[in-house]
Image (tube, coloured by chain):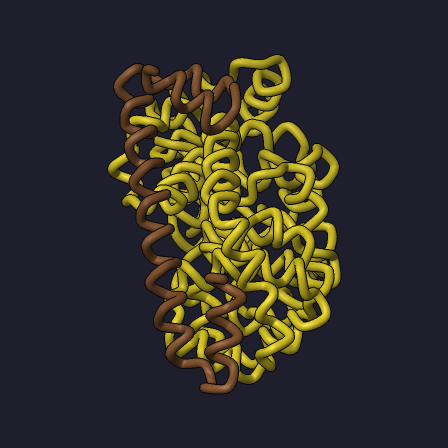
Amino acid sequence: MTDFLTQSQLGLLARTLHVEPDEIRSLEHLGAAALHELRERISNRLFDQHAAMFGRISKLAPLVPNAVVAKVSELAVPALVAGRAAGALGVDHPGRIEDLLSRLSAGYMADCAPHLDPRAIAVLAPRVSGDVLVPAAAELMRRKDYVTTASFVEFATPELIRAFERGIDDDLGLLHTAALTYSADILSDVIRAIPTARLDSIMRSSLTTPESIRAGLSVLSRLPAAQRAELGDALVAHVTPEVRPALLDAVVDGEMAGELLDLIAVVSDEARRVLADDPALATDARTAALEAAADTDARRQALEALRALLPA
Amino acid sequence: MDARATLHDRLGRTAAVDALSDAEAVQVTELLAAAERDERQALDASIDVTLRHLPRLVRMPARRILFG
């Protein structure tokens, strides 16, 4: 099963090349880092080919007030073009970007978002308030376009993260966005900016479906040990006897036994007892999966710790 | 110039391109060329349509700025 990061980077590359992911599925073997590099270089080239024309369009800005720009854009400019142009124009006229965006519909902004130049997002994100961006982010969540929301998280300020957290009540949307966030450092910073109560709610929601269980484990596995331990304890606090079989099935089916062992390695003894208190852990499939995944000293020790707590 | 060399030329030297198979390098080269062409055409078409929607007073100065 392809890991979340490789999946999201393949999706981003496919979108950059205007094709469906299946058309470039064979490139999965490159892995997340190489796909990220390839997509970044291709994206830069596609944007840079328009630089001269965007420079000329930018000179029109003094002639056209924001109200007209917004109206004409939604009426006549396809999202691909608007997205491509918006970054360049925003960088040239940063003082106008907040007011202009506030005049666009959330739907149109969500249409354009996938086509923005990541280099421009980095420059513009600090200049735009959450009030303006949250409706578009909520629309992207509604569309389940987590590849786009994750690409924006890379550039979100702590203030924007807090605004998104307050304005978006979709726990699973935030979880899947986190799972597809490329930089582990940024992922850690983003999680640090989210209130504890909300993180607890997201951890509880992560136990809802096999896909969300895998997303949650993927996020936890990429965090520093101390942060993983804290969130891991929060996750396991919601693991009931009814939920535990689904968690273990998702781990085995999703080939995430290694991630589970990474979690067991750092959580509290109480959390380990909750995970171990399941006779089904002794089944062949689950035992085999855990043993196969115990490929480091830390994982082997975690497996031994789990075994010591298994019901007799 | 083979596909891999073309990609190095257009994207800069990168290990990601080196890791592509020959067939994949051809595929990515072709997809990149198609994306460049499609985006140029989309931008050109969009400019024409947008100019028609601008207020009349702005249209002529806008055309001069864009096309000289």
Q: Nearer the viewer, residue B25 or A240?
A: B25
The image position of residue A194, as x and y in percent, is 70, 58
Asked whether residue A300 appears in the rendered view, the answer is yes
* Residue A49 x/y as whole percent: 47, 44
Q: Residue, x 46% and y 55% (percent of image)?
A: A115
* Residue at 63% in and 43% down: A232
Q: Give the drawing colour for chain A.
A: yellow
Question: Is residue A278 visible in this depiction of the protein?
Answer: no
Q: Is residue A135 above or below residue A59?
A: below
Quadrant in the picture for residue A279: top left
Q: Quadrant of residue B46?
A: bottom left
The relative height of residue A293 versus residue A141 in the rendered view (above or below) is above
| A54 or B18: nearer the viewer | A54
Number of numbered markers: 0
**In the rendered picture, chain B carries what hue?**
brown
Q: Relative to residue A2, is residue A121 depicted above or below?
A: below
| Quadrant housing the N terminus of chain A | top left
> Which quadrant holds residue A60?
bottom right
Q: Position of residue B3 (x, y in %)?
A: 33, 20
Residue A226 coordinates in the image, percent (x, y): 74, 37
Residue at x-position 46% and y-position 22%? B9
Q: Residue most toward the front?
A: B68
Q: Is residue A137 left or right of residue A17?
A: right
Residue depicted at x 33% and y 29%: B28
